[in-house]
Amino acid sequence: MKKILITINTLGLAGAEVALLGLLQQLDPKEYEVSLYVITGQGELRERLPKHVKLLNKCYCDSSVLSAEGRKALMKTVLKALIAKGKGIILFPYLLKHLMKQITSGKICPDKLLWRVLSEASERFEETYDLAIAYLEGGATYYVADHVKAKKKATFVHVDYSEAGYNRSLDRNCYLKFDKIFTVSDEVKTSILAVYPECKEKTEVFHNILNQENIRDKAKEPGGFTDFYEGFRILTVGRLTVQKAYDISIEAMKLLKDKGIDARWYVLGEGDQRTMLTTKIQQLGLQEDFLLLGAVDNPYPYYAQTDIYVHATRFEGKSIAIQEAQTLGCPILVSDCSGNREQVTHGVDGLLCDLTPEAICDGIRKLYEQEDKRKEYGVNASKKKLTNPEEVEKLLVLMKE
């Protein structure tokens, strides 16, 4: 039986983690012994892991890294890595060098620095695996590249590499150590090859594996909106982070209200931008119009009950949320950025717009006023085949080479 190790940074309720669950379900337990290691040792999706997957973490916290309890647990993990295991001292020159680079560039990303610390402080295993997979950038990729014994190594890239704050110096050229680099879209492939051009021959697109039937079934379960609002509903699903550009969406909502459009915008997700976004919502008087509902276990009834889905972000890799919205037949408006433009065909299954309050407002207004177009886009979106179970063969073939 072939032995596979998969690593991921966290196991929270986010796109990459949901995509990982789809991948794990495709690995036959009769043929593969699958182990999973979570770099932070926490995340609320542990209970959703297939029974045949062995979680290697000795200590594990089920709290989301975005919850108050989860943030405390993560801080303890980071402090233990920095102080108790002395990695902060060992890595001080590296951390200082790249912190200064971030300050100079104006893009400060402390999480990108801490992934190296957490990778260095993570558990070690003597097992030699037939295949080791790093399923996310940063910590998981560093860990597999430097600390895992395997006959073959593969890594996944889910984001626009440079836009997300990564570079060769920060990564210590770790991608050169992998036998295969999988990207979730063509644009993500282009972005990483712009930095690692010598990896062209071993880089390939690996589409997300999505269980569309399960999504449709879960959309029929109890749940969804509870405010008895009868106007036009707008939905966005995603973490409250800078990448998701909710600050711009809030301004777009203000423009919609000023134009007299009867609508409410709901956001499912949690993140470090909540306080700032709540303040902005209050400043613009949108407390009843732009609602931050937090993370929910089953978002699918919300998709099924909304009038349109909006995904206006600064950059993406390949959004699981967009794919979920398409599966459930939502008419969609997305910002014209990397990742998004590859998923939605303008005027066919949705609309693309610039990432400005005015453009987002205009796109929503068009969908608001054109019910026939909303229905057309929704039907076309629901016809997309996004399951992609055949993609798993791209991984398994590595063990046969």
Image: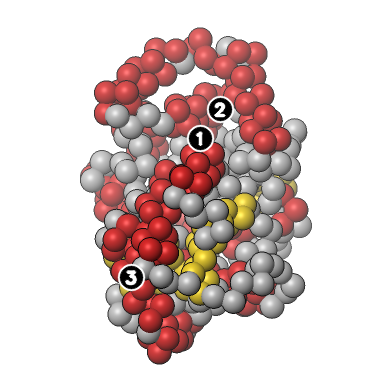
Q: Nearer the viewer, residue 197 or 136?
A: 136
Pointer 2 with pointer 1, Cβ within 8 A: yes
Q: CA distance from mark 2 to mark 1?
A: 7 Å
Q: Residues within 10 Å of mark 3 (few under 14, many from 20)?
A: many
Left/right of residue 369 with respect to residue 35 in the rendered view: left
Residue in the image at 48% along x and 72% along y: 262
How many angstroms separate mark 1 from mark 3 (CA)? Answer: 38 Å
- Residue 67 in the image: state x and y as whole percent: 66, 40
Numbered mark located on residue 118 in the image = 2
Mark in front: 2 vs 3: 3
Question: In this view of the protein, which residue sits in the foreground, 341 or 37?
Answer: 341
Q: Helix or strand or loop: what does disc 2 sit on?
A: helix
Residue under the image location 32 percent in, 57 percent down: 357
Q: Are marks 2 and 3 in contact (CB under 8 Å)?
A: no
Residue that label 1 marks: 139
Q: Left or right: where does residue 76 sit relative to residue 140?
A: right
Give the Cα distance between marks 2 and 3: 42 Å
